[in-house]
Amino acid sequence: MNNHYLFDHAWDTFKAFDDLTVEGSGLDQAEFPTSIWQILRHLITWQAFQLRQLQGTMLAKPFQEDATWSRERVPSDEAVLQAAVQEFKGQLAAFQASLTQPAATDEQELTKHQILQEVALHLSFHLGEVVLIRRLKGSYPLPHQMKAFLQA
């Protein structure tokens, strides 16, 4: 059965990390519990764990989500920020690609879809945070501006 379409738009980030600058990723976000940079780093680390799970790789020690949160609120420079954004986008492409790779058993297929569902839910939660922070800081369009923004 081709379940590719179950997650058709699950990896759409709605440009939440596009055009992000060092300043916009954390310098002006002291009033928020976490900065966009910290959220991005958390997503990358957490998604790397989930990709290993999809590949059947078990960790030597239990995964500690608390350890995925960086204390650094801002990237060191623009190159580091852009490398992280590209790594994040590469992970999303890997999740998408995993949908076309058949599992050996029905149980493995179910596990794969459960992991992908968890990733999609986790991603949507944190993307909501990023969009809200960016809107409050004036660097992301309001709802009535989204159609034009997404088409650009």
Image: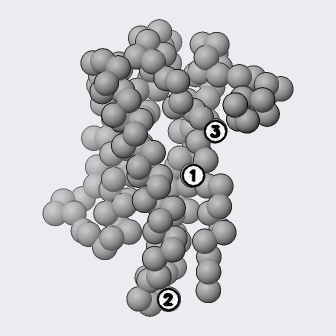
- Which quadrant would the N terminus be assigned to in this image? bottom right
- Residue matched to label 3: 14
Specify the farthest residue to the left. 60
Marks 2/3 in contact by CB < 8 Å: the verdict is no
Q: Which amino acid, mark 3?
A: Phe
Give residue 63's position: percent from left, percent from top.
28, 55
> Residue 22: image x %, image y %?
40, 16
Q: Nearer the viewer, mark 1 or mark 2?
A: 1
Quarter location, residue 27: top left
Q: Residue at x 59, y 21 (%)?
A: 134
Say whether disc 1 or disc 2 marks the residue closer to the N-terminus: 1
What colouring method underlies this structural image?
one colour
Q: Secondary structure at mark 3?
A: loop
Q: Residue furthest bottom?
A: 105
Residue to which mark 1 is pinned: 11
Please name the residue that numbered disc 2 is placed on: 106
- Residue 111 location (% of width, % of height): 46, 76
Give residue 104's quadrant in the image: bottom left
Q: Position of 152 compared to 44: left or right?
A: right
- For the C terminus, which image quadrant? top right
Identified at 62% across, 76% down, the residue is 3
Name the residue: 18% across, 59% down.
61
Looking at the rendered structure, the kind of residue marked 2 is: Asp
